[in-house]
Amino acid sequence: VADVVELARGEAPETALEDVSLDELVGHEVDRARRHWPALYFRFDPQRGVVRGVPARLARAVANLLDNAGKFSSAGSEVEVAVTAGGVLTVADHGPGIPDDAIARVFDRFYRADEARALPGSGLGLSIVQQVIDGHSGTVSITNRDGGGTIVRVALPPAGLPPPQAPRIEALSAT
């Protein structure tokens, strides 16, 4: 239910935005993930980075990424988390990776690759990540890493910069 409510929220009003220490926010979520996934090693490499955003929504997106990394990692493996001064978050795991035919759909609502259907989840976690990051004028991408696992890269505009203008999309008529 919480996932559906998060998706229904849409974008946060401009007045809810504030300067957010991305390294501190991610550090808090890494600590939570360490408690939730005690059989994994979360290595955190933070650089001070401040972005403009809604802390609770950003925390939810980061928590979803860390939970996915935990869910798909084997006991004893490492999840590498980094934040750069430019507002880039990277989460890399050593799990099985995502099948090539599924990688283009992982941000779709309710989509679950065949290999993930036996695991808990609703198929909304990465959709929420996409919605939150889009709402913060950022980008999110996911790729498979050599040797197994995935790398998720989130780039958020640093605080103090105006958000980029969204591209104008015009409907094409069917005439």
Image: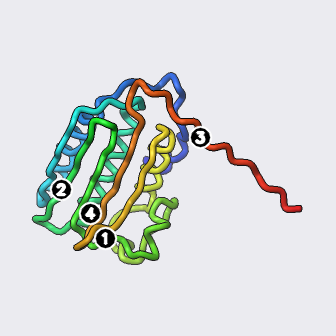
Q: Secondary structure at mark 2?
A: loop
Per the model, the C-alpha gap separating discs 3 and 1 is 31 Å
User: Where residue 140 sits: x, y (%)?
Assistant: 42, 51
The image shows residue 59, relative to residue 38, as above or below, that is above
Q: Residue at x 14, y 64 (%)?
A: 77
Task: Quadrant for residue 13, please give it.
Answer: top right
Per the model, the C-alpha gap separating discs 4 and 3 is 33 Å
User: Where residue 133 sits: x, y (%)?
Assistant: 45, 44
Task: Quadrant for residue 124, please give it.
Answer: bottom left
Per the model, the C-alpha gap separating discs 4 and 1 is 12 Å
Q: Secondary structure at mark 3?
A: loop
The residue most toward the right is: 175
Work out whether mark 3 precedes mark 2 in sequence or the reverse, and give the earlier one. 2
User: Where residue 27 sits: x, y (%)?
Assistant: 21, 39
Q: Is residue 44 left or right of residue 158?
A: left
According to the picture, the residue beneath numbered tag 4 turns out to be: 71
According to the picture, the residue beneath numbered tag 3 turns out to be: 166
Q: Is residue 65 left or right of residue 132?
A: left
According to the picture, the residue beneath numbered tag 1 turns out to be: 97
Work out whether mark 3 precedes mark 1 in sequence or the reverse, and give the earlier one. 1
Per the model, the C-alpha gap separating discs 3 and 2 is 37 Å
Which of 9 and 86 lies nearest the eye of the viewer? 86
Q: Categorize mark 4 by other alpha carbons within 10 Å: few (<14), some (14-19), many (20+).
A: some
Q: Amino acid at mark 4?
A: Lys
Q: Is residue 76 left or right of residue 138?
A: left
According to the picture, the residue beneath numbered tag 2 turns out to be: 37
Q: Amino acid at mark 1?
A: Gly
- Which one is closest to the eye, mark 4 or mark 3? 3
Q: Is residue 151 left or right of residue 32?
A: right
